[in-house]
Image (cartoon, rainbow, N blue to C red):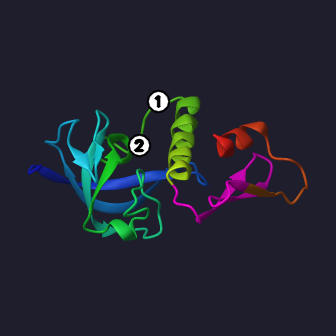
Amino acid sequence: MPNASKECQLFIPDLVNRGDVLVAIGRAYMDCVPTDTVHGIPLGEENVRVTITVPKLNRALLPSPTNEATTIKEAILSRVLCKNRYGSIVSPVQQNVDRVTYIRERADYIVRILRNAPKGKRFLMPYNSGQHWILAVIDSWDDSVMYFNPLGNQPSDDFKDLITA
């Protein structure tokens, strides 16, 4: 079991405002090795074990949800798996990152949340196409997606690819 820990802040991507949002404060265990596990999942090279101690945004989805917890509130005082880049262990503000890398990381985050969602969950995903807002409602029960576009247009192929990934 890890012993050496330090306080950290957990940030997740804010897809609406294109920044990061602080969702919790916790303790990061820095002496873990890649073969250590959290709820049976190996840490790997890029992850750290974090205990969430102070929630800041209860309904925020965990970066790596488990069967036991999918939101910050459900994970209070529990150890969770967290990519090192989402915590302030590595500065949450990334300097000189090209836009393609930035968007790809955010897309990977959304894909991971959707793939690990238990059946019966519905997700509301607002999206700004650069001209106006549209809404996708994703139903994990039957893997269906409904798009609400006030202009009646189909969403862009990039947005459809993200949803169907």
| Secondary structure state at the residue bearing disc 1 | loop
Q: Is residue 26 visible?
A: yes
Residue 96's disc number: 1
Kind of residue at disc 1: Asn
Tell me if label 1 and label 2 are in contact, CB under 8 Å. no
Q: Which residue is located at x 47 percent, y 63 percent?
A: 60
Is residue 89 visible to the viewer in this orientation of the structure? no
User: Looking at this rendering, what residue extends furthest in the left direction?
Assistant: 3
Instruction: Decide whether residue 129 is among the magenta residues.
Output: yes
Between 58 and 160, the one lying in front of the other is 160
In the image: residue 141, left or right of residue 10: right
**Residue count near mark 1 (Cα–Cα under 10 Å), binned few <14, some 14–19, many ≥20:** few
Residue under numbered circle 2: 93
Give the quarter of the image for residue 157.
top right
Q: Position of residue 54 (x, y in %)?
A: 29, 69
Q: Is residue 57 left or right of residue 128?
A: left
Cα distance in 3D space between marks 1 and 2: 10 Å
Q: x and y percent of residue 40 in the render? A: 28, 49
Residue in view at x 35 percent, y 55 percent: 10
Residue span colored magenta: 117-144
How many numbered tags mark residues here? 2
**Could you tell me which quadrant the C terminus lies in?**
top right
Residue 32: image x %, image y %? 17, 42
